[in-house]
Amino acid sequence: MQMTRPPVFKPFTLALVQLGSIGADKSANLQHARDMILKAAAGRAKKPELIVLPECFNSPYGHVHFPVYAEEIEFTPGKPYDVAKSSSTSVKMLSAAAKETGTWLIGGSIPERDPTTNNIYNTCTVYSPNGDLVATHRKVHLFDIDIPGKITFKESETLTGGTTTNFFDTDFARIGLGICYDIRFPELAMISARQGCHVLVYPGAFNLITGPLHWELLQRARAVDNQVFVSMCSPARDSSAGYHAWGHSMVVDPMAKVLAEAAEGEEIVFVDIDPQLLMDARAAIPVTMQRRFDVYKDLSEEN
């Protein structure tokens, strides 16, 4: 990605939609997501500048479901994207919702099929307030785990990992992207922060095993490591689903303080992001100026 100077970091309001009622009917999932985006946009006297949906908001979460619900997006960074010609019903809904609300929208993630390779990705899409698709992020690190007696899950049975780091610029911040399991890898967050990102957003869906262990810990770790704001947006917990999401959508400040946290059910979390917190953290504990790249590599220089 060609590097440009980050925008000036300005105060803004972030809205996390912890979406519930995600079932087998994709059209119903899309309609409910649209309704919640509109609700988030109208939920406060001051409209949020950025709205975020959770991971896999248009389909049940599971490797068997990804191929069934996958859509072709065919986005090329740096090139105009014609939403009207897109075959993706999810992209069209998200674009229209962003335009209708006049907000930036991180559309959680959806299963994406690449028509040239037939590979399937877990892909986040981002929309400007006029409805343009401006960025995507394909989940880089696939959720392949085996905790004996508790949970086994292998996204790699049907998904392919992405190969790029990604961010997008607004008029109020540079925002880095990741998806769920990506947050376990500090390199991705480190690169995004070194590229000038002020906020890192990860649509995610931890479960009832990994959630209580690491959901908050990882967000606070990535925030304090890089002195940035970090947020994860989860689906609501549904005990009748095949995969039980942890919930607890969260925002953490650059000093690792939890600014807001959802419970388990469907809700919208609003957080006012104050750039002064980032500036104060970096002034008080100036690790961004104390790195020893004569001793170890600057990972962002290789990306």
Image (cartoon, rainbow, N blue to C red):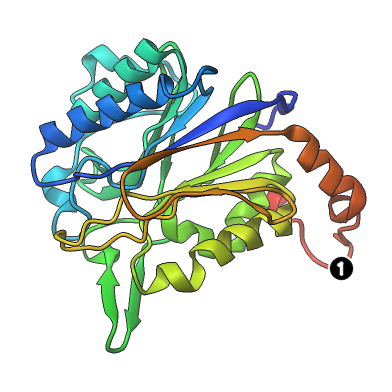
Q: Residue at x 73, y 28 (%)?
A: 9
Q: In which quadrant of the rendered image does the N terminus lie?
A: top right
Quarter holding residue 106: top left
Q: Residue at x 32, y 14 (%)?
A: 82
Q: Nearer the viewer, residue 185 or 42?
A: 42
Q: Nearer the viewer, residue 264 or 280?
A: 264
Do we see residue 1 in this rendering? no
| Location of mark 1 (residue) | 295
Number of callouts:
1
Quarter holding residue 225: bottom right
Would you place residue 29 above or below residue 133 in this image? below
Would you place residue 216 above or below residue 107 in this image? below
Extreme residue in the front direction: 45
Q: Where in the figure is residue 57, as x and y percent of width and height? A: 27, 42
SS assignment at label 1: loop
Q: Would residue 286 be found to the left or right of residue 98 on screen?
A: right
Q: Where in the figure is residue 73, as x and y percent of width and height? A: 28, 31
Q: Residue at x 61, y 62 (%)?
A: 186
Q: Nearer the viewer, residue 191 or 285?
A: 285
For the residue marked with disc 1, what is the amino acid? Val
Q: Residue at x 72, y 46 (%)?
A: 194
Q: Would residue 71 be found to the left or right of residue 46 on screen?
A: left
